Amino acid sequence: MKLFPLHLIPNDTTIDFMRHRRPVLAFMLVLLIASIAIIGLKGFSFALEFTGGTMVRTHFEHPIHVDKVRERLVTAGIHNAQVQSVGGGNDVMVRLQPEKEHNNAADAAQQVADKVRAAVTTSDNPATVQPGEFVGPQVGRDLAMNGVYATLFMLVGFLVYIAARFELKFALVASITAFFDLILTIAYMSMLGREFDLTVLAGLLSVMGFAVNDIIVVFDRVRENFRSLRVDSLEVLNRSINQTLSRTIITAVMFFLSAMALYLYGGQSMEGLAETHMIGAIIVVVSSVIVAVPMLTIGPFRVSKQDLMPKAKDHAELARRP
């Protein structure tokens, strides 16, 4: 593989990925169980979108950096506030978690807004605030459920699409692998205590799409090789991985670098999305090589040449081509 001036992987690689497939798959199963345990024990640090709270839009007379606003809020005793630059450099959005039991008074949100203004305003850069907007916990619960529905929708969609394009075995393996990637990425975010907000959720869905796209490319080569090569199944799978290895790594590197650029220059509001993409890129490239294809050799997922021989509809489609 030639990436920029670097030559990382020879085009004729013959790495025997299938040789240690069983212990590797067993290790991945242990890793999956450990990830689920981490998620169960540590849980998530849900953002305001999911927990409810108050949003306060603050306008400064002069441009101000969000880090400076955070420092002033912490100094004033307001912790765990999300501060995001909006519009130009003069406006920031401050999001606050609910404090104990929410005050249901009519002017409760306004009281929070006044508290924020008092904390961040200075004589040389005074601030004004718009009336605070309270987000109820029910909104957060609905949003969380919508996230679950979106994830399930993607998994089912992948299952149906790949089953129609290949075989049901491939669809199940691809969905299991995408789920594996999702759980490991979530466990990483949970372990680090990364706040779980909408950008992280969007990042997780993107990682799943990236994972399935990568797996489909490898599966395409598996099907092609099964039909054209007269060697045993393990050799077919090995060649398929080696032939697509360069493409898999290049795609993951590009995905990782674009996420890193977003992480470095996108500001704090984009950190969750970028971090999810970066760790997801690493997990996907590993799992598509040592999880997805090796699973095609075990139990009910074992594939054979007969499974992948052209069907009658394929012949009809070929006959229609010019």
Image (tube, rainbow, N blue to C red):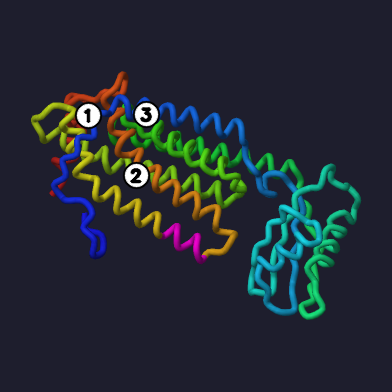
The residues bearing labels 1 and 2 have C-alpha atoms spaced at a distance of 19 Å
Q: Residue furthest left?
A: 230
The residue positioned 62% from the left and 40% from the top of the image is: 44
Query: For the image shown, how many numbered marks are present on the structure?
Result: 3
Tag 2 secondary structure? helix
- Amino acid at dot 2: Val
Spot occupied by residue 70 in the image (x, y as percentages of width and height): 70, 62
Give the farthest residue toward the top.
Answer: 299
Per the rendering, the mark at residue 172 is: 3
Q: Is residue 103 left or right of residue 281?
A: right
Look at the magenta stretch and give its main secondary structure. helix
Q: Residues within 10 Å of mark 3 (few under 14, many from 20)?
A: some
302 in magenta: no
Residue occupying the point 13% across, 26% down: 232
**N-term-proximal mark, 3 vs 1:** 1
The residue segment tinted magenta is: 258-265
Which of discs 2 and 3 lies nearer the camera? The answer is: 2
Q: Secondary structure at mark 3?
A: helix
Position of 22 with respect to 315 (left or right) is right
Q: Amino acid at mark 3?
A: Leu
Q: Residue at x 79, y 73 (%)?
A: 127
Q: Which residue is mark 1?
A: 19
The mark nearer the N terminus, 1 or 2, is 1
Choose top left, top right, bottom left or bottom right for residue 143: top right
Q: Could you tell me residue 33's position as x and y percent?
A: 48, 27
Q: Of the residues shown, which amino acid type is indicated by label 1?
A: Arg
Q: Which mark is residue 285?
A: 2
